[in-house]
Image (cartoon, rainbow, N blue to C red):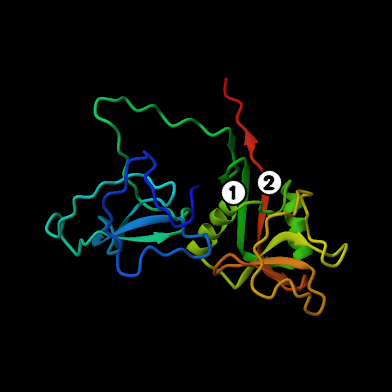
Amino acid sequence: MGQDGDFKWVDKSAVEFSNYGPGWPRNTADVWDCGQIFTGRTCTLPSSNVKCHFHIILVEAVIARCQHQLSSNSLPGNYDGKWETTNCFKSLGYICEMTGGQNPKPTATPDSHCDPGYLLYGDFCYHFETESVKNWQDAEAHCNSEQGHLASFHSQEELSFLTGVIQASPTGISLWMGGHDSVTEGGWEWTDGSPFRYIRWSAGNPDNYYGEDCLSIYINGGYWNDDNCEYKRGYICERRGETCCWS
């Protein structure tokens, strides 16, 4: 990633045209690092009366290049093509561009894969449990039974992935993660034993209010809170992805 707020095309061509809507681009605490173009167009799916909105993803500092020759008469509906910023891990439609005459290579198969119910990011698989709530210890025990731990995070990119998923279908206020300071007050650590270096505490936290020793993440914004370990919440399990063994 480049400097925060400095939008670029991934093909390194000059940004000579922009079409941001009023008040955009915005950056929400280093999370909204990508962009989208909102057509405002609606459609009716063939077998239902569901209305849908078309979005096309752009990118900040790693923006996939889209050149837009926009016309209000080019498509039916409200097609103003204004740009906005958003979380890079939202699932949106997209446009690929290539130089004419080239033969694109197939996308390489990831080195790791996940079982059903888990999402792959990097080399790890994540399960987002929002229907069955548990206290922190029981949530960690369940993740252990799945050969994993409550999730740990070590970079803004990982946390952006997380918040993009949980904000897509928010449930409750917060979810359990693998951080705790139950061994030594103020000595936070992850249950998977990885270094506790990257932090994203919400304002005023951790405050150890009435002995809060477990870490939860707020769904709205992705900030962390030291929490009462006995509260029952949804949780995020993490385990290493299974290595593919194709010959």
Left or right of 211, for residue 117: left
For label 1, the SS is loop
Residue position for label 1 = 118
Residue under the point 35% across and 70% down: 23
Q: Which percent across, then down, holds residue 132?
A: 65, 65
For label 2, the SS is strand
- Which quadrant of the view contains residue 95? top left
Q: Is residue 104 above or below residue 199?
A: above
**Picture disc at residue 239:** 2
**Residue most extreme to the bottom:** 210
Q: Is residue 228 above or below residue 178?
A: below
Residue under the point 88% across and 62% down: 183
Residue under the point 27% across and 59% down: 19
**Picture disc at residue 219:** none
Left or right of 16, for residue 242: right
User: Which of the two labelled residues, at mark 2 and mark 1, occupies the earlier sequence position?
Assistant: 1
- Count neighbours of disc 2 (C-alpha within 10 A) and say few if under 14, some if 14 to 19, many if 20 or more: many
The three-letter amino acid code for the residue at tag 1 is Tyr
The three-letter amino acid code for the residue at tag 2 is Arg
Quarter of the image that includes the C terminus: top right
Q: Which percent across, then down, holds residue 219?
A: 57, 67
Q: Which percent across, then down, holds residue 48?
A: 29, 61
- Which quadrant of the view contains residue 187? bottom right
Left or right of 224, for residue 221: left
Residue under the point 25% across and 59% down: 81
The mark tally for this picture is 2
- Count neighbours of disc 1 (C-alpha within 10 A) and say few if under 14, some if 14 to 19, many if 20 or more: some
Q: Which percent across, then down, holds residue 7?
A: 40, 52
Q: CB under 8 Å between callouts 2 and 1? A: yes
**Residue most extreme to the right:** 183
Closer-to-camera residue (113/111)? 111
Closer-to-camera residue (214/84)? 84
